[in-house]
Image (cartoon, rainbow, N blue to C red):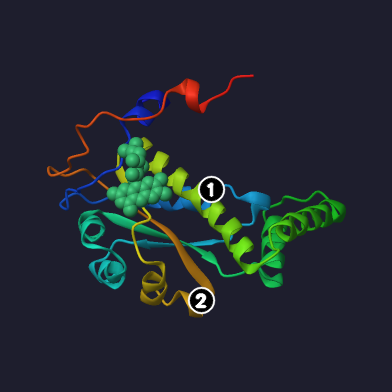
Amino acid sequence: MNLEEIIRNRYTCKAYDESRKVTPDQKRQLMELLRLSPSSVNSQPWHFFVIDTPEGKAQILPAFSEANAAKIDKSALTVVFTTRTEIDEAHLNHLLAQEQQDGRFINDDAKSAQDTGRRYFVNLNSDSVEKQRNWMARQAYISLGFLLLGAAALGMDATPIEGFTPPAMDKALGLEEKGLTSVVVATVGFRGEGDFNTGLPKSRLPQSEVITLL
Ligand SMILES: Cc1cc2nc3c(=O)[nH]c(=O)nc-3n(C[C@H](O)[C@H](O)[C@H](O)COP(=O)(O)O)c2cc1C
């Protein structure tokens, strides 16, 4: 499928065929998609919980209402997108060390410029804990978009899910102790027979309303 076909065919899956599982290679590709998602100043303020075992699913089910719980239950894999509760000094230094290890800096000046630039943008978004968390959540949503498109490109169906209770999710995964907080969820798998959304036409506002060409 080309990109045009992929974006027209992807849709929010409402019911999964629980007999169909993702292959180890599909799972690997989905996890790489998450890991390689872009984020502002390469801040990577996230941690992804990839859940495909009955035990893992059972652990997070209390955070969902009935309709979304069925998707967790029957999909092949669930991703819980979490972000850090704060961007601290240790994280900033860790990012810089990783970039150095990955060969991003031709000299110390380049390294220092990256560090300074990142801190500038982090500070711009850190007037309050709430503002910083909101900024981190926006980065997590980029990875959600990556996952939705990527799953479709791999021939899989997916469901973005905001319909869960974040405090219950944080409790279920022990996120507070880990310095994390839940942001959004997505399920990935294969559409099942009871999916009313499969046959419905896609609905979007017209291009003239949502795009301005200058
Ligand atoms: C951030 C986000 C959260 C969503 N939460 C839910 C949800 O909790 N349950 C659900 O069934 N669909 C959810 N949706 C699906 C949207 O309703 C759907 O993307 C939208 O109607 C457009 O339809 P399409 O994805 O089929 O093209 C969510 C979508 C997004 C992007």
Q: Is residue 35 above or below residue 211?
A: below
Q: Quadrant of the C terminus?
A: top right
Q: What amino acid is labelled 1 in the image?
A: Ser
Q: Locate residue 86, reporting x and y percent.
A: 62, 69
Q: Is residue 169 above or below residue 40?
A: below
Q: Residue furthest front?
A: 209
Q: Locate residue 129, reporting x and y percent.
A: 63, 68
**Which sits earlier in the primary sequence, circle 1 or circle 2?**
1
In the rendered image, which residue does mark 2 sit on?
178
Q: Residue at x 28, y 71 (%)?
A: 62
Q: Secondary structure at mark 2?
A: helix
Q: Residue furthest right?
A: 109
Q: Locate residue 21, reporting x and y percent.
A: 23, 51
Q: Is residue 154 visible?
A: no
Res 53 quadrant in image = bottom left
Q: Which mark is residue 81?
A: none
Q: What amino acid is labelled 2 in the image?
A: Lys
Q: Is residue 194 left or right of residue 25?
A: left
Q: Residue furthest bottom?
A: 177
In the rendered image, which residue does mark 1 sit on?
37
Q: Secondary structure at mark 1?
A: loop
Q: Residue at x 22, y 38 (%)?
A: 197
Q: Is residue 204 above or below residue 185?
A: above
Q: Is residue 189 visible?
A: yes
Q: Nearer the viewer, residue 3 or 196?
A: 196
Structural crowding at the residue carrying mark 2, measured as other residues with C-alpha within 10 Å and reported as few (<14), some (14–19) or many (≥20): few
Q: Is residue 143 left or right of residue 69?
A: right
